[in-house]
Each structure stands twice: as structure tokens, then as C-alpha cells.
Amino acid sequence: MTPPTDPVAPLSADGWLSGVARIDSPNHDARPAGVAISLIVIHAISLPPGEFGGNAVTELFTNRLDPQVHPYFANIAAQRVSTHFFIRRDGAVSQFVSCGQRAWHAGTSCWQGRERCNDFSLGIELEGDDLTAFTSLQYQALVDLLAVLQRHFPVDSIAGHLDIAPGRKTDPGPHFDWSRVAPCMSR
């Protein structure tokens, strides 16, 4: 469960990154034929909202979130969502969906005139919220992960969830420091 520290860490032929924890989510399907990955979407999540640590995010992405554990969970436990990667506050990275598959992270979305961003994107969730700064360990893991992904895919854009779903989403939030990933955006 360590971040990918080697920027050339191999990605397997079936889309799994070595050196990170693999936790299979059932919430994915096939990408449309011939659609290249050209976008990375950065998200933020904390469950319950504003609380970090624990297994609730993993349980949400694997359809095991117990609605009885917290009142907020009753509203979201039936959702079928996922992401490709999740970066915890300590920089630990987990992968839930193969990069070759379509994760269900973007929802109703549009980027540069293209709808259905899940079709052509990879999702990265950071453990965080709109009220809390992200950690240096998260930024380092994110930069390392972006470097690896950009070596394998023709990514030409990195956007926040708020950019692809304006008015509906706010993440990664006002405390996300885009300057920390700016070098990745010009590769």
C-alpha cells in the first residue's frame, strides 16, 4: 500500500499498476471500442464527510458500505460508484479498477465538448474534502502516479471533478493546490 515511487513503474497488460494495493471493485464495465484515455479526473472523498481514515471509502467502492454505521451512509450505500485509484492522507495508493476498464467516477459529465467522461478518462480520488488541505504525501503520490499514467496513455488533460460536472460537483475543492501538479499537466 505504498505510493508508486518509480515514475516508470510497470502497468500490466490488463491495466493494473504494480506496487500499489489492488482492491477489485465490481463497479466498472468495458470502455467503448477504440476510445483512448485522454483525460485524468481528480476527485476528493471522505466518508463520513470530513472524516479521514477507516475503510468506508473502500467499502463504498466495493458495495459493502453498511448503511447502519453512520446516518450519512444510508443515503449513499446503494450507489454503485468506483474509481481507478485512491490516495489516502498518508500517500498510500490503492487501485480499484483496471485502467483498461471504465470506472464509474465521473457521472453526468462533459469535458471540452465531449460527454460521458468515464468513457475516456481515468479517475483518481484523494482522501479529502472542500475544507481541508491535502497532505504533502498525497501530492507526492499523485505526481508519481500521474507520471506513470502519462507514460502509458495519451493523456492531454488533467481536470477536477468540478471542471467536468460544474454546478454539480466541487471536488477536489478550493484547498487543492493545482500548482503542485502543474508540471504534470504540461507533459
Image (cartoon, grey):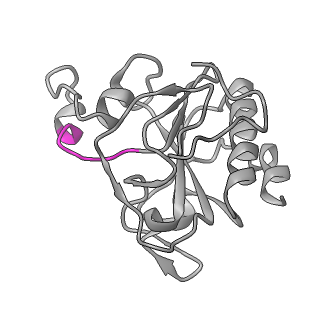
Residue 166 seen anywhere in this rendered image of the structure? no
Across and down, in percent, residue 50 comes to 45, 28
Where is residue 38 drawn, in percent x and y? Answer: 62, 66
Q: Residue 142's x, y, as percent?
A: 69, 38
Q: Quadrant of the C terminus?
A: bottom right
Please report the residue visible at 80 percent of the width from the left and 43 percent of the height from the top. 180
Tell me if 69 is positioned left or right of 174 in this view. left
**Residue 130 drawn above or below residue 58:** below
Q: Quadrant of the N terminus?
A: top right
Residue found at x 41% / y 29%: 23
Q: Quadrant of residue 102?
A: bottom left
* Residue 108 image point, x, y percent: 37, 67
Q: Main secondary structure of the magenta part?
A: loop
Q: Residue furthest bottom?
A: 113
**Does the magenta run of residues contain 76?**
yes
Magenta residues span: 75-82
- 175 vs 50, left or right, is right
Instruction: Out of 65 and 146, give the one closest to the viewer.
Output: 146
Instruction: Work out whether residue 37 or residue 162 is closer to the camera in this orientation and state it.
Output: 37
Residue situated in front as seen by the camera: 29 or 162:
29
Magenta span has 148? no
